[in-house]
Image: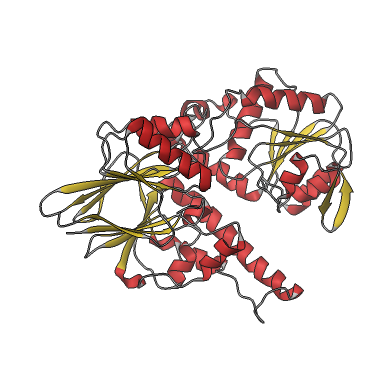
């Protein structure tokens, strides 16, 4: 038996993760991500899949972010009909995110049709909500820390990776006629001191490793994000203002809600209404409650008066009419809404109504990519365009750096050091430029690893005749 690997995404980029493993009579994919970001990357989503789909027999998912699952509806639409394995909490989050992605694809196509900016006469969505729903029957949920078979020769185990709820590193053990080989995929690794999620699991043995390198060149400063959050909230509350927190619906929102509850309960910030104005974030928060065994809050959620997602100050805003009423709110309150980079979603309405008052403040709790409205606000631009109108920015703008869901360089190396038997080969994936190159060099010099940064669509023979 030969084992080969092909990189269909997540190679020299932080998007579109797809790794094809071929053992001859059985082929499977690890992750099935959507390409996002730059136009030349997004256009890959429209390319024909580079292999006959009837030959691919299974998919394994590491977690529910769209850059790891967002291509699934397109793949199923093209003919894939095999099982899609993931942790149970990943599946529930994936359903939420894929439906929303299908809705956005439909809206984008309709907008392009109305405005006439598409190169196509009748622009079509990459996929629809119906296409997303067609994926759901293929999902097969599996628990953490328990191996399962996807083929008589292939055993798979999910371990905690600490990135978002349900996120896993994946161990794949392949049994040949003469010997077995172990492949390990890190998935996206999280922080070791996250207050909600379990830290990445140590995996002692692998023949070949795929390790993400998003922050392979960064070492996070030792900051206490809850302290920064308290300081910013207090400064805005002291002016009698509204706090607006743009946040990603899955992961970041739940962490912010946890910190706000702790700060109010301990008296470090005064009690005030917290409005969670994001239907997707509300649905995702309910998944945290449903799968409490997959995170550290299991004991907290058992105490009704200690529940960070169910208390008197927290209000879930589902209907658009309720959301619009928040625009009239004055006085101390906290609004948490998506999107996290202020590129769309309900948060734009709140920015439109609250940016023009010096009493109010905006607290960004995540990375703001170049070109986004969030980045322009963080860079203190005096005017910002929302809904076609130039608004003067009078509200104070703050950013908290310590809430990233990605492991930094030291934490990536800590995870790598867990392999007591040095892997024969390590692929440095899900990173760009300096991040991947720096981590590859650190793994070589510090741990003596043999590292490769693969190219998009590059193939490798991993083992022959095992």
Q: Quadrant of residue 85?
A: bottom left
Question: Which residue is at 45% across, 63% downward?
Answer: 135
Quadrant showing the C terminus:
bottom left
Tell me if 454 is positioned left or right of 239 in this view. Answer: left
Q: Reply above or below: 197 against 454.
A: above
Q: Nearer the viewer, residue 82 or 108?
A: 108
Q: Quadrant of residue 380?
A: top right
Q: Nearer the viewer, residue 52 or 280?
A: 52
Tell me if 2 is positioned left or right of 128 in this view. Answer: left
Tell me if 137 is positioned left or right of 275 in this view. Answer: left
Q: Reply above or below: 200 against 154.
A: above
Q: Position of residue 126 (x, y in %)?
A: 56, 69
Q: Position of residue 65 (x, y in %)?
A: 51, 50
Tell me if 128 is positioned left or right of 119 in this view. Answer: left
Q: Nearer the viewer, residue 306 or 359?
A: 359
Is residue 201 something one can see in this rendering?
Answer: no
Q: What scheme was used to colour the molecule? A: secondary structure
């Amino acid at each position: 038996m030969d084992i080969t690997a092909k990189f269909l995404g997540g190679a020299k980029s932080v998007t579109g993760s797809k790794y094809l493993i071929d053992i001859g009579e059985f082929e499977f994919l690890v992750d099935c991500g959507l390409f996002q970001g730059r136009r030349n990357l997004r256009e890959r989503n429209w390319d024909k899949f580079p292999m006959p789909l009837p030959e691919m027999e299974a998919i394994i998912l590491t977690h529910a972010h769209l850059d790891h699952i967002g291509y699934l509806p397109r793949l199923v639409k093209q003919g894939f009909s095999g099982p899609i394995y993931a942790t149970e909490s990943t599946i529930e989050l994936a359903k939420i995110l894929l439906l929303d992605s299908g809705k956005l694809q439909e809206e984008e196509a309709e907008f392009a049709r109305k405005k006439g900016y598409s190169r196509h006469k009748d622009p079509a969505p990459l996929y629809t909500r119906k296409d997303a729903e067609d994926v759901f029957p293929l999902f097969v949920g599996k628990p953490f820390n328990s191996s399962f078979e996807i083929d008589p020769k292939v055993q798979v185990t999910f371990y905690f990776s600490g990135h978002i709820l349900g996120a896993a590193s994946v161990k794949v053990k392949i049994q040949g006629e003469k010997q077995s080989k172990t492949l390990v995929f890190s998935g996206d690794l999280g922080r070791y001191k996250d207050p909600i999620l379990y830290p990445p699991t140590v995996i002692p043995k692998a023949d070949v490793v795929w390790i993400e390198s998003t922050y392979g060149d960064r070492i996070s400063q030792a900051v206490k994000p809850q302290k920064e959050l308290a300081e910013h909230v207090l400064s805005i509350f002291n002016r009698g203002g509204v706090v607006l927190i743009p946040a990603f619906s899955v992961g970041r929102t739940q962490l912010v809600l946890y910190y706000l509850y702790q700060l109010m309960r301990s008296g470090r910030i005064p009690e005030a209404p917290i409005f969670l104005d994001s239907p997707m974030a509300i649905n995702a928060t309910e998944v945290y409650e449903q799968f409490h065994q997959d995170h550290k809050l299991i004991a907290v959620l058992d105490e009704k008066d200690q529940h960070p997602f169910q208390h008197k100050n927290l209000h879930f805003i589902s209907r658009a009419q309720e959301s619009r009423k928040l625009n009239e709110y004055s006085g101390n309150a906290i609004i948490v809404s998506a999107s996290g980079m202020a590129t769309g979603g309900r948060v734009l309405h709140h920015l439109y109504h609250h940016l023009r008052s010096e009493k109010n403040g905006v607290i960004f709790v995540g990375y703001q990519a170049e070109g986004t409205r969030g980045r322009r606000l963080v860079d203190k631009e005096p005017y910002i365009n929302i809904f076609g109108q130039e608004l003067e920015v009078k509200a104070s703008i703050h950013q908290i750096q310590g809430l990233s869901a990605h492991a930094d360089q030291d934490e990536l190396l800590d995870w790598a050091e867990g392999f007591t038997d040095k892997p024969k080969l390590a692929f440095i994936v899900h990173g760009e430029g300096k991040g991947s190159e720096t981590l590859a060099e650190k793994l070589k010099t510090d741990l003596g690893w043999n590292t490769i940064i693969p190219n998009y669509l590059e193939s490798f023979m991993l083992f022959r005749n095992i």
